[in-house]
Amino acid sequence: MDRGQLKIQEMAFVLLAIVLLGFISFIFYAKIQSENIQSSAGDIKVKTALSLRDKIAALPEIKCAEKPCIDKDKALMLKDYNIKGMFQGITEAKIIQIYPSDERIVLYSSGQGNTSYSTFVNLCEQKNIGGIFSYDCGLAILEVSI
């Protein structure tokens, strides 16, 4: 073999090794970026669910008129309408009363979600006692599933 051919062959192997190393580096970089994107998507889903949970608790359609609470009668009316646009981004929204009674009010359901986020809320029912309106309140959990 000629000395020039050896140099050319040596150069070809070095170039092949550089290309192979670059390809392997690109695969690792793509895998790391893919994991970062999946992690970011999960964080965005969590933030969206928490934001929607807080927005549902403050909806004027179910909020009490005078107190910071959820009106049970309004929530029961809303569940019958099942408004999809209001609950975009979640699979289920429900209110679970835990005191003084045990009752579930499913505001929206489009299937079973993977992850649920909940918060405690006051669930009140307006009573008319002798012409005077007052709220009879209890403890409930507002649960949102994504």
Image (spheres, rainbow, N blue to C red):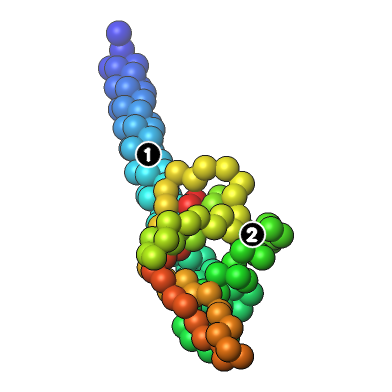
User: 35 or 23: nearer the eye?
Assistant: 35
Farthest residue, direction top: 1
| Mark 1 crowd level (few <14, some 14–19, many ≥20, 10 Å Cα) | few
Three-letter amino acid code of the residue under disc 2: Lys
Left or right for 109, reference 99? right
Residue 133 placement (x, y as % from top left): 57, 88
Three-letter amino acid code of the residue under disc 1: Lys
Residue 25 placement (x, y as % from top left): 33, 37
- The image quadrant that residue 16 belongs to is top left
**In the displayed structure, would residue 60 be above or below residue 48?**
below
User: 12 or 68: nearer the eye?
Assistant: 68
| Mark 2 crowd level (few <14, some 14–19, many ≥20, 10 Å Cα) | some
Q: Earlier in the sequence, mark 2 or mark 1?
A: 1
Q: Which residue is mark 1?
A: 31
Question: CA gap, disc 2 to disc 1?
Answer: 44 Å
Secondary-structure class at tag 1: helix
**In the displayed structure, would residue 97 be above or below residue 29?**
below
Farthest residue, direction front: 130
Foreground tag (2 vs 1)? 2
**In the displayed structure, would residue 30 be above or below residue 82?**
above
Q: Which residue is mark 2?
A: 79
Left or right for 55, reference 83? left
Residue at 69% in and 58% down: 80
Secondary-structure class at tag 2: helix
Residue at 37% in and 44% down: 35
Residue at 33% in and 37% down: 28
